[in-house]
Amino acid sequence: MSGVEATSAAAGATRGEVEAAIEAMRLQGVHTLLVQFTDLQGVAKGKHVPLQHLQQVLGAGAGFAGPSIVGTGLARTGPRSEYLARGDLSTLRALPWLPGYARIVADGFVDGQAFESCPRQVLRRATARLADRGWTLRTGIEPEFFLLRRGQEDGRGWAPFDAWDRLDKPSYDLKSLPRRAAFLHALREALEAGGLTVEQIDHEDAHGQFELNFAHDEALRSADHLMLFKLAAHTLAEREGAVFSMMPKPFADQPGSGLHFHVSLWRDGQSLFGSGDEGRALERHFIAGVLEHARGLCALAAPTVNSYKRLAAGESRSGTTWAPATISHGPNNRTALLRTLPGRFEWRLPDASANPYLATAGLIAAGLDGIDRCLQPPAAVDDDLYELTAAALGARGIATLPATLGEAAAALEDDAVLCSALGASLHANLCRLQRDEWMAFSRHVSDWEMARYADGL
């Protein structure tokens, strides 16, 4: 099934199915649809549509001005100026934190065709390649996030929302965690009502930082779940007067927020990785492909200037960063890019700012390239990679990840496999946006520079 066919199948529904869905929503008090799609930068976008227009949302779709959406590259006039968000009925869920509203996830269409640069369509194309081989990729995504407050009216002077959250090693802190219990419980209830299984919630290794884990699922559904998490968390945090932040590294002296992916390949309901000779070979080749394309994948998994503050190796206030700096893999090795575990691996590169659809699509493309070319990974690493010097890493042939967004964007630009997976238009738009962001950052004169150089030279 092609990506277009798969999308059409998901969008298609009989009149009886639509009427039943409307009635089910009305019984839950729903009167309005939140038609939601995701832009190039991983931000949820959408509009409100009265529930009685569900058939239109599933058919033609809800209309948006294409050029107003980041990264579409669409014209201001003509048939390719209109972006239509066509709902996927399987995602329709009432939103408990927003009574009367139900979210439906949408795919982008332009001029009657699946829009090549819609991130969800990009991931559909990637999962269709797996389906052609009888495979399914399952991901368990672990979002880390901060609850912050603004220290001044101009938005500067950010601090953790909880002023008492200040242990030197705050991981698993059972003093700060209960103080945020109301927010975290409301978030859990909201996600479970949306069809997710929340497995655990903990205080992470930085002040004001938390992590929520939900059960693994098929790759497209996992990405949809992550966007639901973001929608719920933003709204519920605002109600407490806090700012929910997925900025990768808000505090220079503390660890940043990752978005770790637990990855496994399945066929006919059975996990393949690590299962028999075939499964072990597939896992090795897949891992080798991810390592082969690690530099280009940085632009998808760590897509902001701030991302590279997280990826920089070095001590933090709590003693470590928990973010990879090298292209490496190892058994249960949290200092490596890929942490291998029974039946799966953990991809530790993505940070909280990553677009889950594009990061997953890039991961699939890299893994399939490794399988198709029968690539072999380098030797597994048991060492604490944070303790190895640059010379020691070089002697062992362990390369480093890009140090800046500029380097990552250049690597993505040169990666033909990832370009093909993203589509030429999205690939070009993303590289351009990231180059522009890197240039703007490079030209910015910071407070640190003024304090260091203004009267000291």
Image: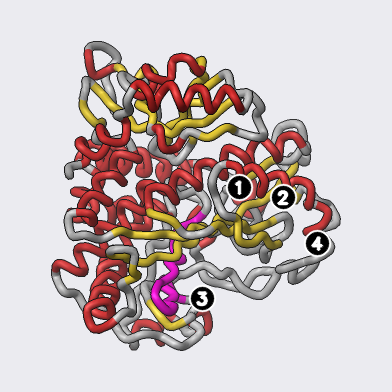
Question: Which residue carries the number 1 mark?
Answer: 192
Could you say whether the residue bearing mark 3 is in a helix, strand or loop? loop
Question: Which residue carries the number 3 mark?
Answer: 334
Q: Can residue 434 be seen? A: yes
Query: Magenta span covers which residues?
Result: 336-351
Which numbered disc flags the more N-terminal residue, 2 or 3?
Answer: 2
Of badges 2 and 4, nearer the viewer stands: 2
Q: Which mark is residue 184?
A: 2
Of badges 3 and 1, nearer the viewer stands: 1
**Would you say 298 lies left or right of 308 here?**
left
Asked if the residue under mark 4 is in contact with the one under mark 2, i.e. CB atoms within 8 Å, the reply is: no
Which numbered disc flags the more N-terminal residue, 3 or 1?
Answer: 1
Which numbered disc flags the more N-terminal residue, 1 or 4?
Answer: 4
Q: Residues within 10 Å of mark 1 (few under 14, many from 20)?
A: some
Please tell me whether residue 343 belongs to the stretch shown in magenta: yes
Question: Which residue carries the number 4 mark?
Answer: 166
Which numbered disc flags the more N-terminal residue, 2 or 4?
Answer: 4
